Every structure is written in structure tokens, then in C-alpha cells.
Amino acid sequence: MEYSDQSNRNDQMVRFGIYRIIEHLALIVLFIVLSATGLPQKFYYLGISQSVIVILGGIDNLRLFHHLAGVLFAALAMQHIIANFVGVAFLRWEPSMLVTLKDAQDAVQNVRYYLGLDDRPAQCGRYTYKEKCIYWLVIIGGFQMIISGFILWFPVIATQYLPGMVIPVSKMVHTSEAMLIFILVVTWHIYDSVLSPDVFPLNKSIFTGNIHRKQMKQLHPLEMEEKSETETVLLSARHGHTMAEDHKRTRQ
Amino acid sequence: MRTMIHIIETVILLCLLQLVWTFEAPVFAQERTETAASKYCLDCHVNKSTVKKFADGSFVSTHIDSHAFNESVHGTLDCTACHQEFSSASHPERSFRSKVQYQIMASRRCRDCHSDTVISSRSIHVALLRKEKSGEAIICTNCHSAHMISRTGAGPVAKSEDKYCLRCHSSEGRKSFINGEIISTQVNAAEILGSPHKDIGCSDCHSGFSAGDHPNNRFGSEREYRHASAEICRRCHYDKYSKVAEGIHYKMLSVGRLDAPTCVDCHGTHAVSSPERNRLSIVKKCAECHRQVYLAYAKSVHGGALLNENNRDVAICTDCHSSHSMQSTSSNDFHDEIPDKCSNCHSNPVVMGKYGLSTEVVKTYLSDFHGMTLSLYRKETWRHYGPPPAMAVCTDCHGTHDIARVSGADVRQMKTKLLKRCSSCHPGASENFPDAWLSHYRPSFTIAPMVFITEQFYRVMLPITIVGILFLVLLDIWRYYKNR
């Protein structure tokens, strides 16, 4: 299914605000930098790793870039937690990322549908169970990476409070969890948002903030229903709203 | 009638014999005694005390040993065959700058008969002719001598040369140096014959010496003489020499330290041998100068096994320091190459198997932070920011010459020692810090259980994740095409 830019702009509706777009872009950049500087350390004996190390000016430089990107990633994760906690607690943001019983039911339903035991795929809300799964794996894995990463960066300080064994454990966690997240992202997430026949060649909504109504109906039918009941958001009407209103709406 | 025929036959036979005798007689006479012309020369040249002096003060004896000359391959020739300008009527007075110039001129005479093409059949001559083209003169008499030339086909020149030299050098003799030191000039022929040099001649090493020439080289001291002698080795063993030239001992020598060891100090002179056969002798040799190191080594696990059991597997000096290109041990390169050196034995299952030692030690080191970083530093042939910081290598924890057995050691004491080592690079390291190192063990339930459990968890999780994702993706695609 192709949702080209040439189609009627009135068919577009807002899915993400500028905050989410920037957050996701930052995450992409940091993911690439951390992978590019982290994988050569894990597989340091491979020729390609050593080429990367040479290009970046030696292992010391590579580690420096990895540490810098790690600090930025930690900052990104912290602001995400704080912003969303404040948003949900005080600004009445809907906690749409929380995992509910319905997600488990959706997953079962979808597997039944895949196997031909059911006629309809699961009807999902703002975030599908797949998106939630990736999200929470990245959040939990990300915090594992941050903690183990800082322990490995400052082993002397870490062992002043923790047993020495924490360093090899951290190394094992850091290197293995990185592989897990890396594999999840480059296979499942890339398939789901880039290669899947539903969105091919690319689900642009996280970059433009907009989504085609047809795609919205297909991927997030429940959210579509909710929105249609209250209001119809047309891109052409965006000029009449302030950014704050837009943002508030998209956060619902 | 029959008697007449017999008489005629006898006369003819006698006549034929006479004919043969007439032709052969002068030849026999020439072989046995000097010709008239040669005899004329020997009237004077039999005198042992006369010499021919040259402009630079050098001289050559004019004495000719007529018997030796007759025995030589040129024994049938007249003196004038070579000394063409001379005759009973003429004895020109010629002057030469030096003995060497005289020898060069004399050698040209040899080449009149022994053409370049003929002598090129011997590889040694080909080499010499090549040198001649580059301006270095050939002196035939250096090898073949002047008047006592023997038949080279009868055996290598060297053989007869050895005999010649040993006429004097088999008995006791003394060489003195300017500083008063004295060495014996006696040579034990058996030593040479038992050495790898048994097929080369004296003058191959002692160049400049020959049957006709015995220069009296003066050296300041025995050390100077030994260092000069070592230069001789270079001519054949250039590969080793160039390695030595990179080494620390040569650097010592180049700043005038004559106590630096040289080839002959370790390998011997006439009794030269490959020291590898007797590893203990190498250690003893190094110990002559490096006494303190030797004492520490003797107490170590390596030294103890060598000295007490004559164990051939343990590391000796040259295994780590190399035998020719010894580097300064304070250099970064030397420090960084230590894991390679230890790994030569400690990664070899054949050697380690004998003693029940693990071959994992180097692998576990290289897969950990220090080993990995070091191996990457060593690949950085260019660096923008100075030499890399030192990474802990084997010897930083285990020690160098005093390496001790690890099994059965006091754990608490080892930990204290280790913490001290860690703290030198990681200031402020607490007592917990050394526990971060798993002591070359692979994680298991008994050793580092937390690491082991984490490892096993991900070992299960990673394949499940990959297979699960693949399954879901394939299902998704399958369903999509099914619905089309």
C-alpha cells in the first residue's frame, strides 16, 4: 500500500508532535554512534572493526566517542523518564505506552490470525503490542546499558561500593544486552517500520509527524475511532492552532 | 743365417732404444735438478737473511726454499718464466710503494698463464673477479702463496693451509697486547674439526694471513682484539650481525663500552658451536655479567626447573630477550611484546600438557580489557597523540625473572600483591578491585557464578530472540501474501 505525498493533504492526520520527532531522531543518531563505536570493541579481532578503529583514530578515540554518546544517551533516557512521569502525573497525558492485558490478547489474536485461525488481525490503539514490546525492551535494556556502562567506565569508583565481581558481570551484561537490543532494532523494528508490506518503503510518521488516514485506520483502528468521535484533524487546519494545542492533542 | 737375423734385430732394437733415450733424457734431468738459469738465481736467493724493502718500510724475504719450490706445481718452470725481466745478464732494481703493491704486480704475472676464463671455473675466483671489477685488486699469493704453490686439485686449499698454519700454531705461543695482556696463540685442531667450521680454512676468518703473509696486528687490549675478531663473523653471518646491530649490546659498544659482549664471547672462537644444544650454558653465559638477574631467575619456577632438573622446556634468557637483537627492557616495544613471548610456551598444548598447565591463559588475557586494548594499540602504527599508555601484561602481575608457581600459593598474599600492581595504574583501587580479574579462569558455577549465570542467560536469550523475530516476520509476510 502506497501513501504517497502527492495524495490529498487532507488525508493526513497528526500522529506525533515535534518533541517526539526530535526525541526519536536523537535516539537514531545515538543508536548509530553507540553501535558503530561499541561493536568494534566487542568484535575487536575482526578486520572491519580494526578499520573502524583506525578511521576513528585509535581505540582511545573510539572509547571517547562511545563514552560521549553514552552520556548523551543517558541524558536522553533521563529526560524521557522525567518528562513522561511529569506529563502523566500532572499534565493528564495518557499513559498510552503502559502494557495492558489487551496487549497480550492482541498478541494471541495476531498469532491466531497469522496461522489462519482467525479472520481479523488484532485491533490496536495508539501503540500496538509490537511497538510497546520494542519500547520497553529499549527502555529496560537502555538502563541496563547505562548502569553497566558507567561501572565499566569507572571501575575504581564502582568497586569502592560494590564487590569486584560486578565488573565482569557488567561487562557480560553490557556486551550481551547490546547485542540483544541491536538485533531487535535492526531486525524487528526495521522490518516493522521500513520493510513490512504494510508500510514499505518507510513509515514516515515519526519523521513528519503525520500519518495517512488509511494507514492510521489499518494500524491503529481504535485510536482512529476515538479521534473521529471527538474531532477531525486535518493538516490544512493546523495553521489555525497554536503549537501548544497541537502538542497537547498529540500527547493524548 | 738365423744368427745373423738375431744380431740385426738386436741392433735395430738397441738403436730404437737409443733414440727414445736421446729424446727423453733431458726431460728427466729437468725434473730432478734446477735448470742452469734457476741455479744461477739460487746462488744468491738461497740466502735467508736478505730482504727486499719497499718505500713504506715493509719488506719481503728474498729467500727461496729450492726444495719446496721443486715440490710445487711450478717446480718445472724456470725462475724467469714468472720473473720475466730478470736473467743471468740483467737484474733490474725496481721500487714499489708497499708490499701490497708488489704483491698486486706479481699477481698480474700469474694471470698471464691462468686466464680469467680458466680460473672462473671456481666460484671463489668468480667472486674475486667481481671484486676486481669494482676496483679491489686480486692478490693470488694470499691464498696460493708465491713459490710453494701446491696442487689445488689434490684437496681444498684450506686443508693444506690448515696444515701450514698449524705448523706453528699447534704449539704454545703468545700474543701480547699494548696494555700488557697476553693470550695464547695455540690452536687445538680438534676443536675446529669438531665445529661447524671444519670445512673452512684459517685465512677465511683470519683474512690477511697466508703462507706468504703474517701481519703483526697490534691491539690495545684483549677486549679490543675480541671485538675486532667478531667483525670477521659478519662476513658470513650478516643476518645475525644486522640483528646484533639493532640490539642493546651493540649500542653499548657503539658508545665505547668494550665490556659489551660480542660474537666470540657467547659462541666461542675455534670451538664455535650452536649454544642451543646446551640451554644451561646460555644462562651461565648471561650470568657472567647479569649476576643479580641470574640469582632471581635461579629461584623462579623457570630457573629452578632448569638448574635442578635440566628441564629443556622452561624459558631461558634468550627465549624472552632473544639471542641477537636484545632490546632495552625499558622500551615500550619490549613491554608490549611480552604476551607473545609467554604465549610461545603457554599456548602450546604439547608443552603445557606435560605439566598440567592451562593453555587458556593467553586467550583469557587477550579477551579481557588489558589484552584487547594492548593488541589494538600494537596495530596503531600511527598515533596523533604520543605513545599509548602502558597496559598491564603478564609480567606486571607475575613478575619477570622471579616468576613463581601460582598453584599452592598463599591467596591472601597474592591478592595483596595484585592490589599493589593494580594501584600503580588505577590509583585509589579498593580491596575489591582485583576481584574484577577472573585470574585467567573461564566463568563457571564455582568460579565467578554471577558472570556465569549472566553469560548463560544471554546464551539462551539471544538465539530465542533471533528465532522468535524471524518467526514473526516470516508469519507476517506469509499472511500478507495469503491475503492478497
Image: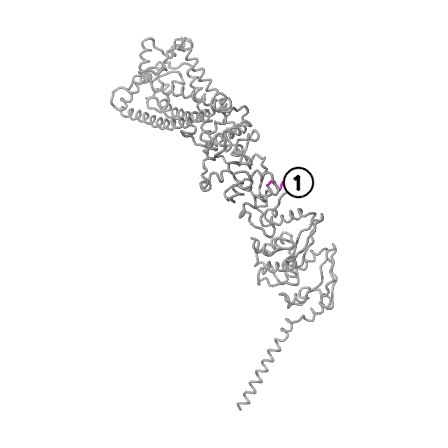
- Residue situated in front as seen by the camera: A122 or A5: A122
Q: How many labels, in total? A: 1
Residue at 43% over, 32% down: B442
Q: Callout 1 environment at 10 Å: few (<14), some (14 to 19), or many (20+)?
A: few
User: In the figure, is residue A176 to the left or right of B191?
Assistant: left
* Quadrant in which the C terminus of chain B is drawn: top left
- Residue situated in front as seen by the camera: B243 or B434: B434
- The residue identified by callout 1 is B255
From the top left corner, tell me how far across and down residue B48 is, in percent: 72, 63
Does the magenta portion include B78?
no
The residue under label 1 is which amino acid type?
Val
Task: Report whether residue A29 is seen.
Answer: no
Against A6, residue B157 (above or below) is below
From the top left corner, tell me how far across and down residue B213 is, in percent: 67, 57
- Residue situated in front as seen by the camera: A191 or A153: A153
Q: Main secondary structure of the magenta part?
A: helix
Against A28, residue B226 (above or below) is below
User: In the figure, is residue B77 to the left or right of B435?
Assistant: right
Q: In the picture, residue A236 is in which quadrant? A: top left
From the top left corner, tell me how far across and down residue B469 is, in percent: 34, 25
**Please, which chain is the residue tagged with disc 1 on?**
B
Q: Which residue lies furthest to the bottom in this view?
A: B1
Against B301, residue B21 (above or below) is below
Does the magenta portion include B248?
yes
From the top left corner, tell me how far across and down residue B329 is, in percent: 58, 36
Q: How is the image coloured?
A: one colour
Per the image, label 1 sits on a secondary structure element best described as loop
Span shown in magenta: B247-254
User: In the figure, is residue B367 to the left or right of B222?
Assistant: left
Task: Report whether residue A230 is seen.
Answer: yes
